[in-house]
Amino acid sequence: MKFSVSFFSNVNDTTAQNMQDHYEFLFEVIQYAEKNGWYGVWFPERHYHTFGGLFPSPSVFAAAVARETKKLRIQVGSVILPLHSPIRIAEEWAMVDQLSKGRVSISFASGWNPNDFKENPEHFDQRKIRMWQGIERIENLWNDKETDVTIFPKPYQQQIPIYVTVASSKETCYEAGKHGYHLLTHFIFNDMNDVKQKIELYHAGLREGGHSIEDKDVTILLHTYLDHDLEMVEKTVKNAFFEYQHAFLSLAEMIPHYESKREEEIAKTMMLRKYSPHYSLLGTPETCSTVLRKLEEIGVTQVAALIDFGLQRQKIMESLERLQLLVKEENAQTI
C-alpha cells in the first residue's frame, strides 16, 4: 500500500499572516513526506469558504510543490471540472506536469455544493455530464486528438493518471472503472461495507471496460492522528475534529443546534467515535494497523492521510512520526 499526506485545511483566522503561516506549515509537512519516502501529497479545490479555503487554485499550489520537491507525487483531489474550461485545465496541468518532470495525478469531481457554482449556476444541474465530457476533452487535448485546438505544452508524462472522486454514487464508481480511470473516495457518510461495495462496483466497471484491475489505484482519504492509547487520541482530537466537521456541515447549511453544553459534549464524542478507531487513522498504531489491513483486503491501494483538521502543529508532526514507524512495520510500499 502507498502512503500520501493529504491537506484540506479549515482556516478560522483569515488574516494574511495566519494564511501565510498555514502555507509555510504545509510545506514543512511536504518536506517531511519527501524526506521520508512517502508516495505523494493530495490537496483539494475549494471556493468561497474557510473550509478548504487555502486551495482556490490547486494548480498554483501544485506548481509550488513541484519546485520544492523532487520525488513526491503531486495529486489534486479534486478538480471540480464543471466550474472550468477543459482547455484551461488541460493547459495548466500539462504545465505543472512539465515543471514536476511528470509527477502529476488529477482526480476530477462533478461538485455537490450549489454555492460553488456562483459564476455559472446553470452548470450545476448538468454537472455529472459536464464532468465526463470535460475529462474526455482534456484527454483529447493532451493526446492531440482535437481537430480545431492544439495546446502547449503537452504533459511530460505520456499519460497523466486520471482519477474520479466518488462520495457515494454507485453509478459513478462503475463508470470510473468502465472508462479505465483510478478511484478516489472517503468514509464521509460511509462505513467499511459501503466502501467495499464501491470498490466492487469500480472493479466490475474495469472488467466491463476491458481494463486491468492490477494497474489501477484506489485511494481513500483518512483523517489521521496516532497516539499511544485511545483515551489520549480522544482527548487530543475531539474538540478540533468537532469544529472541523461543523465547518464541513456549514457548507451545506446543516449545522445542528445543541440545547446545552452537555448535549454538545455528547455530540463531540459521538462524532469522533463514528470515525475513530474503525473508519480513520484516528487511533493507536495497533488500531490503525487493523484498519489498514481491512482496507487492503477490500482493494484500497493508497492511503491519503488527512492531517490538517485543526490540531496543534507539534501534535501533527508527532503523529506523522508514529505513522512513519507504522508504515515501516507494515512493510508498506512507499516510493
Image: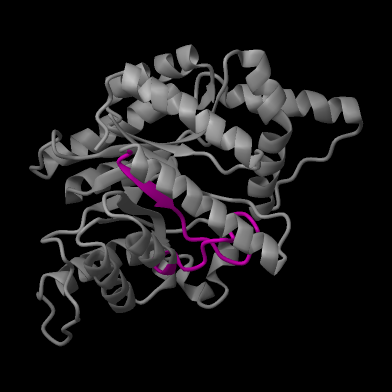
Task: Classify the position of the C terminus by image quarter.
Answer: top left
Image point 65% across, 26% down: which residue?
272
Q: Is residue 85 left or right of residue 322?
A: left
Location of residue 315 in the rendering, given as x and y in whole percent from the top left corner: 61, 33
Q: Write down the quadrant of residue 22 in the picture.
A: bottom right
Relative to 16, is 112 above or below?
above
The N terminus sits in image quarter = top left
Query: Residue 158 or 328: which is nearer the viewer?
Result: 328
Q: Position of residue 271 (x, y in %)?
A: 67, 28
Q: Main secondary structure of the magenta part?
A: loop
Residue 143 picture location, percent across and down: 11, 70
Is residue 20 at all visible to an observer of this figure?
Answer: yes
Q: Residue drawn 16% across and 73% down? A: 154
What coloring was used for the rendering? Answer: one colour
Query: Which residue is at a point 47% across and 16% down the rendered structure image?
Result: 285
Residue 56 part of the magenta segment: yes
Find residue 306 and report its horizontal and vertical position in percent: 49, 40
Given residues 150 and 292, the one toward you in this image is 292
The answer to whether residue 190 shows anywhere in this view is: no
The residue sitting at 59% across, 61% down in the picture is 53
Instruction: Pick out the residue farthest to the bottom.
Output: 148
Which stretch is magenta? 38-60
Q: Is residue 169 above or below residue 149?
A: above
Q: Viewed as shown, does residue 321 lie left or right of 87?
A: right
Q: Quadrant of residue 85?
A: bottom left
Left of 280 or right of it: where is 17?
Answer: right
In this orientation, which residue lies closer to the viewer: 313 or 6?
313
Q: Residue furthest front?
A: 35
Does 292 lie within the magenta span?
A: no
